[in-house]
Image (cartoon, grey):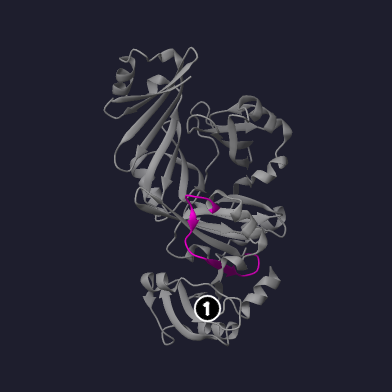
Amino acid sequence: MKKLLSAFVVGAALSLFASCQKETGSGGPGTIPQSVLNQFASLYPTATNVQWTTKGNDYAIATFTLTNTKANGAQNSAWFALQSGSWGMTETEILFDQLPEAVKTAFNASEYAQAPWYLDDQEIDIIYRGEGQETLYVIEVEQRDNNQTIEMKLYYTADGTLTKEFGKEEDYSGYFPQQLPTSIESWIATNYPGATIIEIDHEGAGYEAEIYHEGIKYDIVFTANSEWSYTETDYERNQLSLIPQGVRDAVDAQYNSSEWRIDDVKKYVSTTVTYYIFELERTTGRDDEQKVYVMEDGTLSLTRPGYENGAQGDAGAGIPVGEDISAFIAENYPGASVIERDYDKGYQEIEIWHDNVEKTLKFTSNNAWVSTEYDLRQFNQLPQNIQDALTADAEFVATGVEDIEVTELANGTTTYEVEVKSGRLEITFRVDGNGNISKEYDD
């Protein structure tokens, strides 16, 4: 890391100058603190075409060009903290062919290297930061869907680990190194010596540190008082052997590998409980997903441990999700508690516990709500008009209900999918909010 950073400081950096100009205030050498100007001059003595902007009261941003570097002729952006004058990160562009081999290999093996996805362009963004902070390689991909362009950024570490799949963010200000309380820094150094930091989020509720240690990504949440709350470990598909055999066997016994594939696995550890979260996708028939929780002894549950009887478990204490999302949850799901946050296929996913049900809320990169999805365990949990519409259907067998999925969309519509088994026949009833039914048969 130190070697890579030193090579960069003599000359590399990425640019989002157009977006910076759009989002930041104007600036110039006369409005930038001398400490920032001095720091910039010492880092980039050969920089040309230097222009300054500011972002609120937080950052001063120099955009410039360098010659005779890997990013020869590219537009670069160096970010500095206005208050302290310290350098935080520099962004630059390279071509896809200039990526580390591990990153190219990982990307080419992913779904994003195949149709309908395609590279937005051949230029790759690199985010260089200080010691102890991971260098990130950002690949932009997009696809066309219903005459709309869906854009996504993939964040890789140098060894090819995909750390984040998210919608196209306006800029990289969220990756400017944040200062953790000394007690949290000491805790991380003690428990994960030599770890590097990918991202830090801090809101009033607490701190979330995403770190990288010995080839594995961890999300560690601390309370507002800097006390450790819990740790989630992310396992790539090539790391599944690190999961205890008994845990894997328990999942295989219930979800045959010929019908289900593992999409994602996490390990959750707190002061009171340890379990694994398997996200499964059906490989045949319906487009179906299932989340399964597995204790270390192999016990399976479809409900998050600690919440089986509607009780509030210890998950989610102090998860920072941002003011916009917090306000949305408080208004639309009063009394809910946030129990997990993740990124998947371009969306920010927030897991909440509301009305004794675990619900998944999806938000875009600019925090716009897209949908809410959740499962119901009992038929009588459905709204009465939906129950009435189903029981009036001659093919519906209430005693055969196997699964109930609810999807709420931002356009105001709600859909209920009720899977029923009648003999050897499986019928999926799709019901809209007005009780209109469509069916899908699976023998």
* Amino acid on which the number 1 mark rests in the picture: Gly
The one nearer the camera, 50 or 94, is 94
The x and y percentages for residue 66 are 55, 82
Residue wearing tag 1:
85
Residue at image location 59% in from the left, 35% down from the top: 261
Is 120 included in the stretch rendered in magenta? Answer: yes
Q: Which image quadrant is residue 200 in?
A: bottom right
- From this view, report whether residue 261 is shown above or below residue 229: above
The x and y percentages for residue 40 are 54, 82
Position of 138 with respect to 422 (left or right) is: right
Q: Could you tell me if residue 17 is visible in this image? A: yes
**Image quadrant for the N terminus?**
bottom right
Position of 432 with respect to 302 (left or right) is: left
- From this view, report whether residue 319 is shown above or below residue 72: above
Residue at image location 72% in from the left, 36% down from the top: 244
Is 127 included in the stretch rendered in magenta? Answer: yes
